[in-house]
Image (spheres, helix red, strand yellow):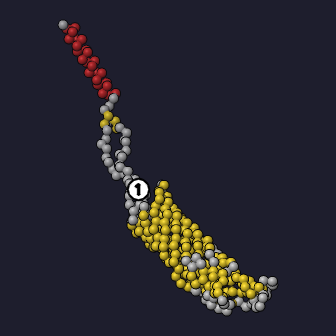
Amino acid sequence: MKKMLASTAILSLAGLTSALAADIGSPPVVYPPVIEEPVYHAPEVHASSGWYLRGDAGYGWNRLRGITYSVSGGTNDFTTSKLKRSFSVGAGVGYQFNKRFRSDLTLDYITNTKFTGSTVGSCGVGNPCTSTDLASYTAWSLLANAYVDLFTYGRVTAYAGAGLGATYIDWGDLRNTSCLTATPTTCDPTITHAGAYGWRATAALMAGASIKITCGLAADVNYRYRYMAGGRMFGYSTGGGPGFTKAIHTHEGRAGLRYSFGGCADTYIPPYEPPTLPPVYK
């Protein structure tokens, strides 16, 4: 009996010793409470909405379909009529209705554009001669435009648009110098025709892309075709007049900036994910 009690006491003492040793060798794991603190995430930039301002600069290739002028007994056409390239600068105000559609009103100034032409006729009796004609014009073009955003890839949005309006063109004086065809150095005195001015119906087609820089600021690069109706170019003077141009066609490459006051229509902020903290042993 005594031996059994002694054995039980030894086993109990051994179990208690093992438990104490386990407690000492493997301290309890205590995890600190998770404190959810706000973490800043950069917002994704999407299409802006609302009012916007724009500014653009362009470089244009111009083509003149021809010029007709009055002479005694009828009309005649210029043999050649060429326009030099031109620069344009402009500004506008518009409104972004939704992610797909926007419109604006723009005013562009077209810098001095030089014209060179020629006619063939007679100097005196039976003396064929060639006339050289020089002039230039400046213009203000007012257009109401509408655009459709076709698709967006990252920060780049491709679009197409069209515009209607009018252009106020101001032609400078036309200087006409006639020289004998056989001896080009033999010339008549230069004749000056007063330049004409007035409004011309104008239409435009555009295609381009905008690149988001910030939520409200975008760069814009585009191609624009502009059609300007013909009209009076110069008045009467010795030898003929007035003269009328046919339509002027311009192909432009343009670049500019667009600033929107509407902010971001859709700003996505990812949900908060608390950081994983390592366990703390005590």
Residue 280 location in percent, x, y? 34, 38
The residue under label 1 is: 43
The C terminus lies in which quarter of the figure? top left
Q: Is residue 168 above or below residue 37?
A: below
Task: For residue 114, say whether it is visible.
Answer: no
* Residue extending furthest toward the left: 1
Can residue 23 be seen here? The reply is yes
The part of the image, by quadrant, that contains residue 134 is: bottom right
- Residue at horizontal 74 percent and vertical 87 percent from the top: 122
Quadrant of the snapshot with the N terminus: top left
Residue 62 horizontal/vertical position (percent): 61, 73
Compare residues 240 and 266 and report the one nearer the observer: 240
Amino acid type at mark 1 = Pro
Name which residue lies at 43% across and 58% down.
45
Number of numbered discs: 1
x 63%, y 82%: residue:
68
